[in-house]
Amino acid sequence: MSLVKTSLLNGIAVAVKVASALVLNKILAVYVGPAGYAIIGQFQNAVSIVVSLAGGVVATGVTKATAQHFDDEAKQHAVWQTAIRFSLGASLFAAVILLFVGNSLAQWLLHRSDMSSVFVWLAFTLPAMAANNLLMAIVNGKKEISIYVAANIFGSLVSMLLTGLLAYMFGLYGALVAFTINPAVAMLSTVAMVGRRDWFKTKFLWAKINRNALRELAGFGLMGLTTSLTVPVTYMLIRNYLGANLGLTAAGYWQASWKISEIYLMLITTTLTVYYLPRLAEIKTAEELKTEIYKVYGFVMPIVVAGAVIIYILRDFIIQTLFTPDFLPMRELFSWQLTGDVIKIGAFVLAYIMLGRAMVKLFIFTEIVFCVSFFLLTWVFVSKWGLQGVAIAYVVNYSVYWGCMVYIVRNEMKKMKNIAEAKSI
């Protein structure tokens, strides 16, 4: 499927997701306030880490392997079966751990010991979350865009309705519980839609672990684990640092600005996942890779730049519409935050090549180095420029990251050309 057609179909899901996120954002802003917003950010990052440890780390590998073995269903099934076994085992293990450490996590992450039971909810819904992630990864790898779009639309609507209702009824606690329930509910619709396809049967999902498939997924598992640990942990450390030095409300302002970035960048990030990653798995030559990079840049960068400019111009209106007047101090973050968004997407177009071509060591190294540097730059810049320092750190960090990606991709393309020349001799 073409980049434009994929983006148009995916745009429908993104439009629903953005609309749902905007409505939900307003509800949360009203019922939990800036400080509660910071706590929600901490919990969402914790959920992300736990889901990854519960098998989510192999989802990217499942997508890539499913797309790569498009002409060999036996290999596809082996990958699915291995991933399911691994994910369910890991999710059950992680669930047991959560039941034992929930109190400590509530005190450390949420600064609220009375919220410990949300980790019990998370423990019981983990297997369903893991199953939904893998089903969506399979759908993506099979390029079943209609199912992918429909499942995302349903998930967005469920998230908005359930989180909004529980936040209205139970405040911050209700919102946190909803974040654990939403993916499990979404799984039901995903199963219903996938079950109608001829290529999907439950027997394709359950068998012994295949060693070859496990080796194929191992590299992606390591890359996924690295991202799933380093990125959320970095954000949690930054919020803790901001909370300790500038107050929890200031941390909430940064979380709110980050949420705006997430919302308007959804079209780009999901297109990279739905179209670009499977496409990279199919590319064999350096020239083909170069053409694809330019095509993706030509599509995504004008959208990102236009979005950033519009949001900056309308920043006061956006803050008061999506949040409340209590969030107005966050306006000082917009210029740097939006600049960082543009630079980050530019870097991500190249960084995805490390995923698509299974460049495990380089991916892990750069993820760790630039997550550490983001926190260290925040620590230095916040001490000089206050809250604005975290947004400046974002720009500086991703500028260097983009330069690093340019160097890595150029080297990879040279290797591809040398291999092609050697084969032709």
Image (cartoon, rainbow, N blue to C red):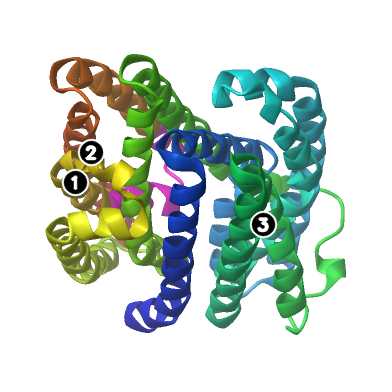
User: Of the residues shown, which amino acid type is indicated by label 3?
Assistant: Asn
Q: Mark number for residue 67?
A: none
Q: Nearer the viewer, mark 2 or mark 3?
A: 2
Q: Are marks 1 and 3 in contact (CB under 8 Å)?
A: no
Query: Residue under circle 3?
Result: 182
Q: Quadrant of residue 305?
A: bottom left
Of 129 and 291, the residue lying toward us: 129
Of 346 and 164, the residue lying toward us: 164
**Residue at 23% over, 35% down:** 394
Q: How many C-alpha atoms fall within 10 Å of the one at disc 2: few (<14), some, or many (≥20)?
A: few
Q: Earlier in the sequence, mark 1 or mark 2?
A: 2
User: Of the residues shown, which amino acid type is indicated by label 2?
Assistant: Pro
**Residue at 41% over, 31% down:** 235
Q: Earlier in the sequence, mark 2 or mark 3?
A: 3
Question: Which percent across, then down, holds residue 260?
Answer: 33, 53
Query: Residue under circle 2?
Result: 329
Up/down of 103 relative to 228, above or below: above
Q: CA distance from mark 1 to mark 2?
A: 10 Å
User: Of the residues shown, which amino acid type is indicated by label 1?
Assistant: Phe
* Local secondary structure at mark 2: helix
**Residue at 39% over, 21% down:** 243
Of 192 and 217, the residue lying toward us: 192
* Local secondary structure at mark 3: helix
Q: CA distance from mark 1 to mark 3?
A: 30 Å
Labels in figure, total: 3
**Residue at 61% over, 65% down:** 161
Question: Which percent across, then down, holds residue 252?
Answer: 38, 35
- Quadrant (top left/top right/bottom left/bottom right) for the N terminus: bottom left
Query: Residue under circle 1?
Result: 334
Numbered range of the magenta stretch: 348-364
* Local secondary structure at mark 1: helix
